[in-house]
Each structure stands twice: as C-alpha cells, then as structure tokens.
Image: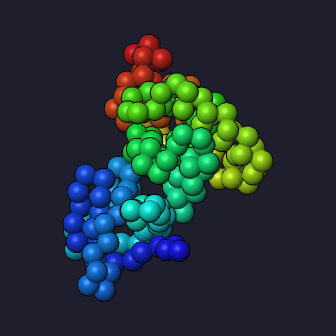
Amino acid sequence: MLGFIKGIIADKGLGILTIDNNGIGYEVNVSTFCLNSVGEVGEEVKLYTYLHVREDELTLFGFADKFEKEVFSKLLLVNGVGPRMAINILSGVSAQDLSFAIATQNASVFKGIKGVGAKIRDRILLELKEKIDALSHLAEVNMNACELNQSENFAQALNVLMDWGVAKPQAQDILTKVYETSDDMETLIAKAFRELGR
C-alpha cells in the first residue's frame, strides 16, 4: 500500500492536489485544511496517503500529517461513513478539533458540515468515543493537538488583553471561558472584552 507520496505540487484544485512524482501526476483528494497547509504550485510536498480500492476505481486520499490520517482512518470505522464523507468532515472541522469534540462529546462541531445528519453525527460521537477511550495515548495526543491548534489565536488574543492592562492569569481564564473552535483572533478578543465589560 502507499504510505506516503513526496513530490512537486503540479496543480491545486478544489479538494484536489496533483503531485508530480518522477514525471507521474498523482491526483490526491485532500481536506480543505490540508490544501491550505501545504505549499504552492512548484513547491515540494509530502502527503501521507490512503488508497481506496473499488472494482472500478482507485482513489487516493492525502493528509498533511499522520494525525489527520489517523483521524480519517477512525472515521472509516463508523457505519455509514465512507472515505469521501470522511474527507468532507475533515474539510468542515480540523482533525484536532474533531478529535477533541469526540473526546468531549460536543455535537455542535458538526454544524454546517454538508451531508452529515444527526444519525451519522451520533454514531461518530458514540463509536469513536469508545475507541479513543480504549487508546488513552491517542486521547492525550488529541487533546494536545487541539491545544496547539488553538495556540496561535489564543496567544495573540492574550497579548492584546495584556497590552490593555489585563493581568495574565485573568486574561487566560477569560479566554479559556469564551473560546470556541470557530473563533478567529478578532472574535475571541471581542468576546473577551464583552466578558470584561469594556
């Protein structure tokens, strides 16, 4: 099986990367997060891969890191979730935020993800919660990865609050209280100031 592919980005499309590997162009299906995290056309990239085999089709899926691939593989264990739905889910929510939502049973993370109804959502939360609990080291990695995903916006917002004279411990408590996975830095700062009554 193909564990990874390394080559030059020949083209970037909607959910597709074409990788030139020794003169052969591989079309790789990727999540929006993966597409945005790799380089531009002409730059080298390494993608971890999953090859989906059917009688009449070979489809290659790619991931920016092993963690996204691992979460993708977990999604495929859920009844009713195929590779295209799994990559669609990972385009709507990052692997880090999804794993954190599963660990905390937060159903709201699925809002706005096209094609994911209540039944599929509930199956994912139930079936993967058990698997994550059974792999305690994976749950720990999930939490740490989610924290890393939050860190840039969180750190920038923290600096802004401190510049406005808010003590660091208080600023951290407020930001932790109001933070949601969809928040950009500006939204996070605005919510923090509302909490402060400014």
- Residue 178 in sight from this viewpoint: yes
Q: Quadrant of residue 183?
A: top left
Residue 70 at x, y = what percent? 58, 57
- Residue 65 in sight from this viewpoint: no
Q: Residue at x 37, y 24 (%)?
A: 190
Residue at the outermost bottom position: 22
Q: Residue at x 28, y 80 (%)?
A: 24
**Front residue of 74 and 163:** 74
| Above or below, comparing residue 15 to residue 121 in the picture | below
Q: Quadrant of residue 103?
A: top right
**Front residue of 101 and 195:** 101
Residue 135 at x, y = what percent? 75, 51
Q: Residue at x 60, y 29 (%)?
A: 122
**In which quadrant will I find the C terminus?**
top left
Q: Is residue 124 left or right of residue 12?
A: right
**Front residue of 177 and 173:** 177
Residue 57 at x, y = what percent? 38, 62
Residue at the outermost front position: 55
| Above or below, comparing residue 30 to residue 113 in the picture | below
Q: Is residue 19 left or right of residue 61?
A: left
Q: Is residue 141 left or right of residue 183?
A: right
Residue 43 at x, y = what percent? 27, 73
| Above or below, comparing residue 196 to residue 115 in the picture | above
Name the colouring of the figure: rainbow
Task: Please count the marks in the image.
Answer: 0
Q: Residue at x 56, y 49 (%)?
A: 76
**Front residue of 190 and 48:** 48
Q: Quadrant of residue 11?
A: bottom left
